[in-house]
């Protein structure tokens, strides 16, 4: 089993749609969780950290379920500029062992 | 714009060459990372330095040799690489949690 698994994608959605990505992790001792986005041939950029209480940043909402070892990202009112690969990232205790998921590709079309 | 810079941005080298990748962070962070991103694979953590000490080394072949002379600079020395080492090499830095990435060096080994 992979340490971090994400929805296979790609997701093809129209502008204005709501789309949800899921991610599961295998190490129950994991401490920190993040979503990054990566545009084609660019470096990953932090989208948001994920907290147990859930957190929201504009159109983006992230949730963490430690009991199920599950992380989610919800994007509302999708924009063309949201087209990218979304990476689920999990840090171990101590924060230095970082595992990236393979990413989920999102295409938002007009 | 990211506070992490990498040089060179592109590098083509033969299998017998020796080259070095350079990373510099201007964010005052205390940890720096090297990652490898191959086509259609997740980012793979290679090395981590915290306060200039190596704290993580993920079974990377000895033909890759990291160096961290101070908290702002990180090098990856390359020698006798193989064609399968062709990839995007990303540097990142962090201060306890979120990592910020440089633009990467796209390496081609002939």
Image (cartoon, grey):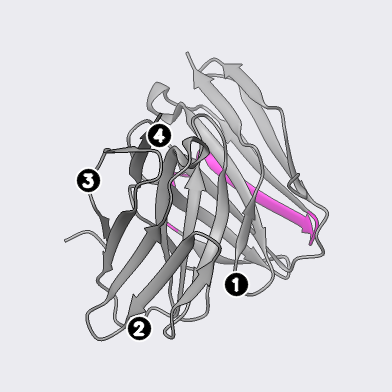
Q: Is residue A23 above or below residue A103?
A: below
Mark 1 and mark 2 residues within 8 Å of each other at the beta carbon = no
**Which subunit holds the residue at mark 1?**
B
Mark 2 and mark 4 residues within 8 Å of each other at the beta carbon = no
Closer to viewer: mark 4 or mark 1: 1
Q: Which residue is mark 1?
A: B97
Expressed as whole percent of the image width and height from the top left, the position of residue B106 reads 56, 27
The magenta segment: B58-72
Find out whether residue B71 is within the magenta segment: yes
| Label 2, label 4: how far apart the Cα atoms are | 28 Å
For label 2, the SS is loop
Q: Nearer the viewer, residue A38 or B6?
A: A38
Q: Which residue lies at the image location 75% right of the left edge and 65% below the top edge? A: B29
For label 4, the SS is loop
Expressed as whole percent of the image width and height from the top left, the position of residue A44 reads 54, 46
The mark found on residue B38 in the picture is 4
The mark found on residue A29 in the picture is 2
Mark 2 neighbour class, 10 Å CA radius: few under 14, some 14 to 19, many 20 or more: few
The mark found on residue A8 in the picture is 3
Mark 3 neighbour class, 10 Å CA radius: few under 14, some 14 to 19, many 20 or more: few
Q: Nearer the viewer, residue B96 or A12?
A: A12
């Amino acid at each position: 089993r992979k340490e971090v698994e994400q929805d296979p994608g790609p997701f093809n959605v129209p502008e204005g749609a709501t789309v949800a990505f899921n991610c599961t992790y295998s190490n129950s001792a994991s401490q920190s969780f993040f979503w990054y986005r990566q545009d084609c041939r660019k470096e990953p950029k932090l989208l948001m950290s994920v907290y147990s209480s859930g957190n929201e940043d504009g159109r983006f909402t992230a949730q963490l379920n430690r009991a199920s070892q599950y992380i989610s990202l919800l994007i509302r009112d999708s924009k063309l500029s949201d087209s990218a690969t979304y990476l689920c990232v999990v840090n171990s205790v101590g924060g230095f062992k970082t595992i990236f998921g393979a990413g989920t590709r999102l295409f938002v079309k007009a | 714009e990211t506070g992490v810079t990498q040089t060179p941005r592109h590098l083509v080298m033969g299998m017998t060459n020796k080259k070095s990748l350079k990373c510099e962070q201007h964010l005052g962070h205390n940890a720096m990372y090297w990652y490898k991103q191959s086509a259609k694979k997740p980012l793979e953590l290679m090395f981590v330095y915290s306060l200039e000490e190596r704290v993580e080394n993920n079974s990377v072949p000895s033909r890759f040799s990291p160096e961290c002379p101070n908290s702002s600079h990180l090098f990856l020395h390359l020698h006798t690489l193989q064609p399968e080492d062709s990839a995007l090499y990303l540097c990142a830095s962090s201060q306890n949690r979120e990592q910020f990435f440089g633009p990467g060096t796209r390496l081609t080994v002939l």
